[in-house]
Image: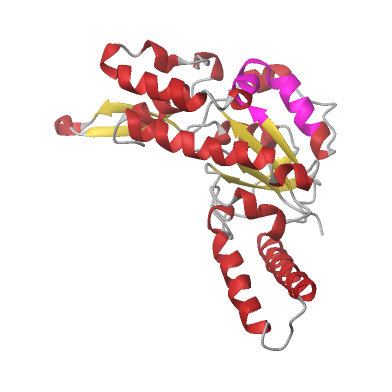
């Protein structure tokens, strides 16, 4: 059974829509049927519930089995079988064109448990500069203030960093870190690298087509009838996006947030 591709990111406004659309347009991947699952599935974000279920079951198994090695083996098998049930539900075997099914969530919650439930899967960890994610979240209305927006990104980025230093090393080459800035400025080269990681054919990638892809999910705030605020999806091509630290230009009124950025990103050089 073909395993799905998971796309995860520290938080919203990281570029997961753009990456998923690029993989779809180039014919490398496809979303599962919308009748089965939404495009942002959050399956991994709640995976700790499956781990908790397995742990509680194992506590009861101890009444009949004292060998810890056998118990852990049963726990591992249970989690893998639960994962395979999810794979069957989403139809991860792909479509008639041989495109792989991808599951996308703008969150890194549950990442450390993903190898236990989906040991044969592959994962793309998409990371965008935290200052840009923060500014984008504020412009899109996804956060109440800059401090909350950046703190959410910092927590998500820390989970990814911890994964790359611990579980990721144990898992081997089943995951890949992708920078949003590379995806926007060098789309063809970045997609070639991703295709190679997935074992997909990227010989027909159209660089011009990739550069013209809109950055889906970005919102524009406009004035509607009677002065009401309305949000519409802005789908301008990525050339409009200015990567690399727009938060630093926000002005002195956000100086405390800039300091928070510097402090919290000091230990995350590999993610920026």
Identity of the residue drawn at 78% across and 70% down: 73
Image coords of residue 196 (percent x, y) = 83, 32
Name of the residue lying farthest toward the bottom: 64
263 and 156: which one is in front?
A: 263
> How many marks do you count on the picture?
0
Q: Residue at x 41, y 13 (%)?
A: 248
**Up/down of 88 relative to 14, above or below:** below
Q: Main secondary structure of the magenta part?
A: helix
Q: How is the image coloured?
A: secondary structure
Q: Specify the farthest residue to the left.
A: 226
Please say if 63 is above or below 258.
below
Residue 124 located within the stretch drawn in magenta:
no
Quarter of the rendering occupied by the N terminus: bottom right
Give me the residue at 34% from left, 30% from top.
Answer: 147
100 sits to left or right of 55: right
Occupied quadrant, residue 195? top right
181 drawn magenta: yes
Q: Position of residue 200 (x, y in %)?
A: 83, 37
Q: Is residue 130 left or right of residue 164?
A: left
Residues in magenta, as a range: 178-195
Front residue of this view, candidates 25 and 264: 264
Visible residue check, residue 262: yes
The image position of residue 139, as x and y in percent, is 35, 26
Q: Position of residue 5 (x, y in %)?
A: 71, 46
* In the image: residue 217, left or right of residue 16: left
Q: State which quarter of the image contains the C terminus.
A: top right
Does the rendering let one see residue 91?
A: no
Name the residue nearer the viewer: 15 or 165. Answer: 165
Please give left or right for residue 13 compared with residue 3 in the image.
left
53 above or below 185? below
């Amino acid at each position: 059974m073909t395993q799905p591709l998971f796309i995860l990111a520290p938080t919203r406004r990281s570029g997961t829509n753009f990456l998923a659309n690029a993989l779809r347009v180039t014919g490398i991947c496809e979303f599962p049927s919308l009748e089965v699952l939404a495009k942002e599935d959050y399956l991994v974000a709640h995976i700790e519930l499956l781990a908790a279920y397995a742990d509680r079951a194992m506590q009861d198994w101890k009444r009949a089995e004292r060998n810890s090695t056998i118990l852990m083996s049963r726990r591992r098998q249970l989690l893998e079988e639960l994962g395979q049930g999810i794979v069957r539900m989403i139809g991860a075997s792909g479509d008639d064109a041989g495109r792989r099914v991808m599951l996308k969530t703008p969150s890194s919650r549950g990442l450390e448990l993903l190898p236990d439930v989906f040991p044969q899967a592959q994962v793309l960890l998409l990371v965008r500069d935290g200052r840009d994610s923060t500014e984008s979240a504020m412009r899109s209305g996804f956060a109440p203030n800059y401090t909350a927006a950046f703190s959410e990104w910092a927590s998500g980025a820390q989970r990814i960093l911890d994964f790359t230093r611990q579980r990721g090393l144990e898992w081997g080459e089943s995951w890949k870190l992708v920078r949003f800035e590379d995806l926007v400025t060098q789309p063809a080269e970045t997609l070639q690298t991703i295709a190679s990681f997935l074992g997909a054919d990227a010989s027909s990638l159209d660089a011009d087509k990739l550069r013209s892809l809109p950055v889906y999910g970005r919102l524009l705030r406009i004035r509607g009838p009677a002065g009401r605020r309305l949000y519409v999806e802005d789908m301008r091509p990525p050339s409009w996006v200015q990567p690399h630290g727009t938060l630093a230009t926000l002005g002195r009124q956000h100086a405390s947030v800039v300091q928070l950025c510097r402090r919290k990103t000091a230990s995350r050089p590999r993610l920026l």
